[in-house]
Amino acid sequence: MSVPLSILDLVSISEGSTARDAITASMASAKLADDLGYRRLWFAEHHNTPNLAASSTALLISQAAAVTEKIRVGSGGVMLPNHAPLMVAEQYGTLANMHGDRIDLGLGRAPGTDMMTAQALSRSSAEPQAFAQNIYDMQGWFGENGTAYSVPIVSAVSTNTNVPIWVLGSTVNGASIAGQLGLPFSIASHFAPDQIDQAIQVYREAFTTESATAQIEEPYVMAGINVMVADTEEQAEREFTVVQQMFQDIHTGQRRRLQPPVEPHQLTGVGAAEHSMLRIKAVGSPQTVKTQLDDFVARTGADELITVTYAYDPAVRDRSYELLADVWF
């Protein structure tokens, strides 16, 4: 039986469009994903990025949860150093009270931006021990008494909501933290594939239920993968040039919105670094992508996949979601 499929949305802004357009399209895609049977929809926090509108995850989650019924909605993730842990607990407790038991809180230690912007946002430490302590306190705020474990501060709005916490990571360090905390691990293999096999192994070996923060009985891995499904192989490869151009822009320092697709042979300046970062992918016709996803699950032993699909035209993204759902569910 196939593992569950989920979606990571960065609310991309295409050339000629606005952030409002991107958010509107994202919410339409959320409704579609809900209807198609995807397990969860997560939004990833980014800042100082002209081509992404996913800066305020809690607001996006609230709107997506309001327009859907079944799909779990959450953060993939909240970059905890940018936030005061109490505020995060209060925001996600409020979401759980508003939308019920469909809210996930994925937490990362990276800032999700450049160092200058990170300094402007900084609110808590990214050091592993501080990160672990903040998670422990948030679990207290989400728990029966609504009180942090380290200080006698109460959060009435998050009390007894029991929002599940995930640890996000891209390296063996993040994997080790997730395992030692006894929490589910979401690995960012869609853009950081170099340590994926080692990280998953480290997570499983480090996993313990003895930690005070443990909330699951056995390791659980959700792995990220770039996906573009189209009716033909050629169409899919052409549409995938959108994300290839985006990663090229990252490496060259160009600050553009998502560019239209081009023929693969027309790509200029796309070097080994860009291709390497995007090598965890499933691109092609529905059956080709299913085979590639099956192979990825076999390689990693992932319990769930979270797919990332960039498209210049939101209709292309939605078509990819539909074709994948038809062949997977």
Image (tube, grey):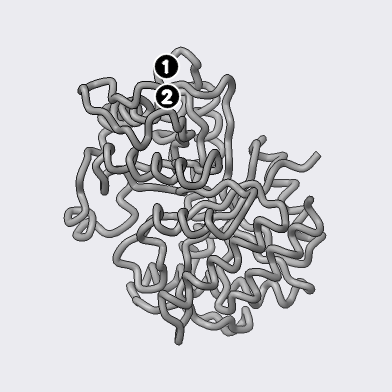
Q: Mark 2 or mark 1, which is nearer the start of the sequence?
A: 2
The quarter in which the N terminus is drawn is: top right
Mark 1 sits on what residue? 211
Q: Is residue 54 left or right of residue 133?
A: right
As drawn, the residue found furthest toward the bottom would be: 16
Mark 2 neighbour density, 10 Å: few (under 14) some (14–19) many (20 or more): many
Image height of 311 relative to 282, above or below = below
**Percent coordinates x, y for residue 200 in the rendering:** 54, 34
Mark 2 sits on what residue? 181
**Percent coordinates x, y for residue 150 in the rendering:** 23, 21
Q: What residue is drawn where x is 69% and y is 72%?
A: 236
Q: Is residue 46 visible?
A: yes
Instruction: Give the amino acid at mark 1.
Output: Ser
Query: Hey, which quadrant is residue 223 in on the image?
Result: top right
Image height of 325 relative to 15, above or below = above
Q: What residue is drawn where x is 68% and y is 63%?
A: 321
